[in-house]
Image (tube, grey):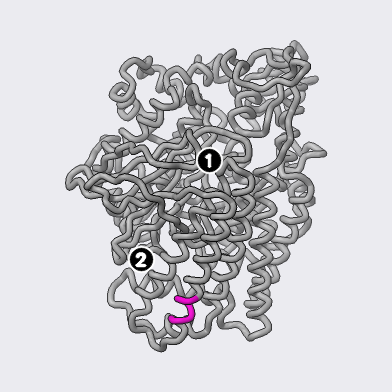
Amino acid sequence: MKTIAILASAAFAAAAAAAPAKAPSRPLVGAYDAATVTRLCDEGLARARASFAKMEAKKGGAGFFDEWNRLQIEMEDVVNPIYLVGSVHPDKAVRDAADPCLTKYTNLSTELFQSERLFARTRATKPANAHQAKLRKDLVEAFEDSGVALPPEKRKRAKEIFERLEELRQAYDRSVRDDPTKVVVAPAEMEGMPEAWVKAQKTDEKGNFVLGLDYPSYFPFLTNARSEEARKRYWIAKQREGGEANLGRLDEIFQLRKELASLYGLPSFAHYSLRRKMVGTPETVTKFLADVKSAVTEVEKRELEELRAEKARETGKALADTTLGRWDVFYYQEKVRKARYAIDQEKLRKYFPTDRAVAFALELSQALYGVKFTERKVPAWHEDVRYFDVTDAKSGAFLSGFYLDLFPREGKYNHAAAFPIRGVSLRAKRTPLSALVTNFNRQGLDQDEMETLLHEFGHVLHGVLSRTEYVSHAGTSTRVDFVEAPSQMFEEWGRREQSLALLARVCPECPRLSADEIARLEAARQFGQGTKYARQWLYAAFDMSLSLDPKPSMEVWRRLESDTPLGHVEGTLFPASFSHIASNYAAGYYGYMWSQVLALDMLSRFSKDMLDPKVGRLYRDTILAQGGQVEPAEMVRRFLGREPSSDAFFREITGRR
């Protein structure tokens, strides 16, 4: 899972820092303790409610867009930094103090969008340009979706549902984030693991290794450990992350969503949600997923048979007596890739030392988009965190800033995500700020981690290069079935010989991948695409099933997973940690693949030259800068100069691109 979108309006508390002349008003995340979180939250709520009351006291649409922009900025300057520190701060007291604040702001947002007076003022506005027309459209939809036009009793119930959904989301995420599960592995079970990885792990008093559920521990073990029993034990522990209580929370979430849709006379939450997305209807998603399943089913079966044959060879068993388990997939995929393509993911780390891989991502972005990144020493929530100014390379104008928080630690958000802290607003002369949060190996990155770095930094670029008039449209505030496209497209620069040559600029002492090695690396990546996208289909089908007709989540998951070639493993609880559908990707998980259709098609503009600064600038201006102020379909048409095509996507998911 590679990304997260913050549902609440943005948030911020500026901290003082010495700033250079070009960035006299550089915004930063301030220092927080638990008491500061609570104080800033309460003070911010009081200010926002006062502004809310003033807006309600007025009539007519005159000045409304600017008033709304100021209010959203006011709210954003509190809640987004609190959302961030609630996910990454090393002090558990700070993380715990953040959740009640997020609940209060969610409740305030619901009240705003249920205000009949503000709704009347929105409808009375007379847009003066296309961006205002888009803002008016988005606001009218948001007011309607929050229940403002419902009868009083239904409106009241809608408010109760929104408040309860936020409580459940927080509890669900907290159970995943704070899951204390450790897996004990005997020294003999470490056979196959890289020596540097083994040395970095903690041990107990008996000398056994104690492994957490974080990605830098989990994925290398599942990929390299020779002990099937240890892999299975670790895999099952990861599949139980979040715990059984989260199943009940997820079930309640989907029942509440169905009830919310019924208040509008709609048959399902999928109908309620999808009418505001690119696809428009559940039927469009259903057909798209059917096309994906049809494309990948036989490819997955063929790939899994290859893995089973490899397992039979390694174990010395007859093929007929060999069963492939889910905990075997990563391990035997790696074995096949090593044998067939001479690619060893662990050895790639010497080619991509983590700090140099980050420098590569920055160098690449500078070359493509005409910007400059300058690291600055600023206060931060942890000593590992780095900060960069973003300026325009040609004019030197200060554009934005971003943080990098790259390494795992106890209690930190344990996936990879870009957190928008502060949204841009040209109208308010406001610069954006984002944070990249990952859990990388400190020594170096493998192919998947390099892909993750570029993907998530793609989200950061979407935020910090955004140039929207209004903060409500800033950065990734676009349709959920488009928001992944810029990030998915950016992954491609980690696979091409031309772009990878930039590594020599930032790390002349690093070994270089030859053209043949890069080609073999890409061939190795293509192996397993059917298995990967069959799994993505399963996640999306699970989400849509619950969104159309909610039933107990484990019952639905067990049924769907049992129909796959590897079946369902009893005792696992995958829905307990599927955070995406507990929050903003509900009835939207298909969006990862829908976005990739557009990402791979947009990539065609770079086919002649992956580092063409003219195409890069066109992309920056046409896609990244526009945020949500232009509909995605229109942005893509402008960039491509034609209607989009899905041909590249279907070649990709079947390993033929």
98 up-or-down from 112: above or below = above
Query: Can residue 188 be seen in the rendering of this structure?
Result: yes
Q: Position of residue 592 (x, y in %)?
A: 52, 48
Q: Residue at x 69, y 13 (%)?
A: 313
Q: Position of residue 303 (x, y in %)?
A: 62, 28
Kindly give the residue lying farthest to the bottom in the view shown: 59
Magenta: predominant secondary structure element? Answer: helix
User: Which of the numbered marks, if any, corresponds to residue 416?
Assistant: 1
287 or 205, nearer to the observer: 205
316 up-or-down from 241: above or below = above
185 up-or-down from 52: above or below = above
Q: CA distance from mark 1 to mark 2?
A: 27 Å
Q: Position of residue 89 (x, y in %)?
A: 56, 44
Quarter of the image for residue 218 reads top right
Q: Position of residue 641 (x, y in %)?
A: 28, 54
Give the side of residue 5 with respect to residue 97, left or right: left
Quarter of the image for residue 544 reads bottom right
What type is the residue that disc 1 sits on?
Answer: Ala
What type is the residue that disc 2 sits on?
Answer: Tyr
Q: Residue at x 44, y 81 (%)?
A: 54
270 or 411, nearer to the observer: 411
Q: Earlier in the sequence, mark 1 or mark 2?
A: 1
**Residue denoted by label 2:** 470
Q: Secondary structure at mark 2?
A: loop
* Span colored in magenta: 50-54
